Image: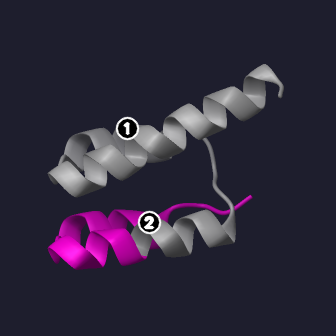
Amino acid sequence: MTNDNEYSIGKFTALETAIANGEEQLVKQLLAEQPMQDLEKSYLIDLAKLSNNHTIIKLLEDAPLK
């Protein structure tokens, strides 16, 4: 596993936690760091929909893909 891979896993976990906690500003910061895969994006949008946080859902929908 490379450092890039470890960073991606750590960032993804941080995004999951921030979404679950409703931390909109942290989600925005983490999304600005690098684009994500389509599957990751779909999963995170589904996770955000569980809490019905429209701001986070919109941030995720607007996030760039790799």
The tag earlier along the polypeptide, 1 or 2, is 1
The structure residue drawn at horizontal position 76% and vertical position 21%, both measured from the top left corner, is 3
Q: Which residue is mark 2?
A: 44
- Left or right of residue 47: residue 10: right
35, above or below 42, in the image: above
- Alpha carbon distance from label 1 to label 2: 15 Å
Which residue is outermost to the top? 3
At which x and y percent is residue 14? 40, 38
User: From the image, which quarter does the C terminus lie in?
Assistant: bottom right
Amino acid identity at mark 2: Leu
At x 44%, y 66%, the residue is 44
66 to 33, vertically: above or below: below
Q: Is residue 6 left or right of residue 56?
A: right
Local secondary structure at mark 1:
helix
Q: Main secondary structure of the magenta part?
A: helix
- CA neighbours of label 2 inside 10 A, class few (<14), some (14 to 19), many (20+): many
- Compared across the picture, whether 65 is left or right of 43 comes to right
Q: Secondary structure under badge 2?
A: helix
Residue 66 visible in the current orientation: yes
Q: Is residue 33 in view?
A: no
Q: Position of residue 21 (x, y in %)?
A: 17, 50
Where residue 64 sits in the image (x, y, percent)?
60, 61
Image spot of residue 63 (x, y percent): 51, 61
Q: Residue at x 47, y 47 (%)?
A: 31
What residue span does the magenta drawing correspond to?
A: 46-66
| Disc 1 target residue | 29
Q: Residue furthest front?
A: 1
Magenta residue check for 51:
yes
Single out the mark in the foreground, 1 or 2: 2
